[in-house]
Image (tube, grey):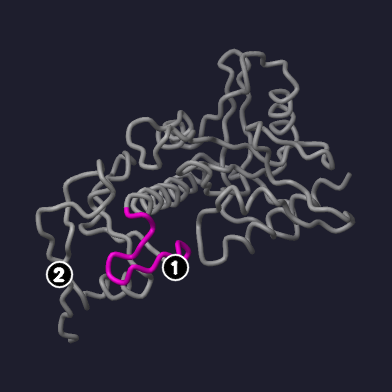
Amino acid sequence: MDDELIRMSAFAALNRLLTGGTVLPWSAIEPGFPAPGFDHRLRFASRAKGIFKPKEMAGILSVRTVIPRKGRRIWYRDQHDGRDALYTGDTTVRYSFRGDDPGSSDNLMLRDAVEKQYPIIYFVAVSPAVYVPLYPAFVVNWYPKRLEADLTFAPSASTTKVVAPPATPIERRYRLVEVKQRVHQAEFREAVLDAYDARCVITGLSVRELLDASHIMPDADENWGQPWIPNGLPLSKIHHAAYDANLIGINPDESSMCRSGCWPIAETWTWSRRSMR
């Protein structure tokens, strides 16, 4: 088994899938990826397990968190534990073992990842069945009594050679801040688009890949709390750029525009073109 070749193929495939974006739906992850020497596609992750080792590899390729569906797509305080682990971490992220037996095969694979220091993929759920892939990630500590392991992140994913984890706490802390920002922005976008049925509030465009979540006011959430959906509007990428460039503005009234049961915010928006300087 050539694990390194498979890992580099997985990273290259994710780079292609993420072109122009930061999140992937499970429908894009599930088909897997091609790798040299194999006449079939290999899997990125498992729907059934959070810790995943393809049968073609000796070591794990990915770990995953989940946000379960609860009969509604808009979610508030009922987040998964993985989110808290990400935002409360300083230099590393806590990842929980599967079950309560540290000696299970899945959990021992995490220990193996610590010993061999190979890069893996961390699929972080930002809404049900939507993920931010973070790679390369490394398992750097294994705590059998706590039933937890620690993950850290390297700054970039090479598609030609295995990279190393950050060498110092400062490097780990810097990289984790970048990861938190990326995941927080993705959470905000997914929550806002879900609240507005993934439609641009100006044009009605409903192609999710062409929509951004624009902040009405600058994001003041310094503690990585839940994305504040009332501060967001779904806009097409061109209208988002125009709004950020101060070429158009908004004037809300007091009724409700988003899906019933969401929050009190504008139903109709007056969009005004501003003079270019």
Taking the spot 71% from the left edge, 38% from the top edge, the residue there is 117
Cα–Cα span, label 2 and label 1: 22 Å
Residue 201 figure quarter: bottom left
Q: Which numbered tag is attached to residue 210?
A: 1
What's the residue type where badge 2 is placed? Answer: Thr
Residue 201 inside the magenta-drawn segment: yes
Q: Which secondary structure class fits the magenta region best?
A: loop
177 displayed left or right of 234: right
Identify the mark at residue 8; answer none if there is no mark: none
Look at mark 2 in the image and give the residue it sits on: 270
Amino acid type, residue under disc 1 in the picture:
Leu
Residue in the foreground of this view, choosing between 225 and 205: 205
Residue placed most toward the observer, 233 or 102: 233
Element type at mark 2? strand
- Residues drawn in magenta: 196-209
Image vertical order of residue 202 relative to residue 191, above or below: below
Circle 1: is it few (<14), some (14-19), or many (20+) Cα within 10 Å? some
Do residues under tags 2 and 1 come within 8 Å of each other at their CB atoms? no
Give the x, y percent position of residue 245: 26, 75
Please report whichever mark, 2 or 1, sits nearer to the chain's N-terminal start.
1
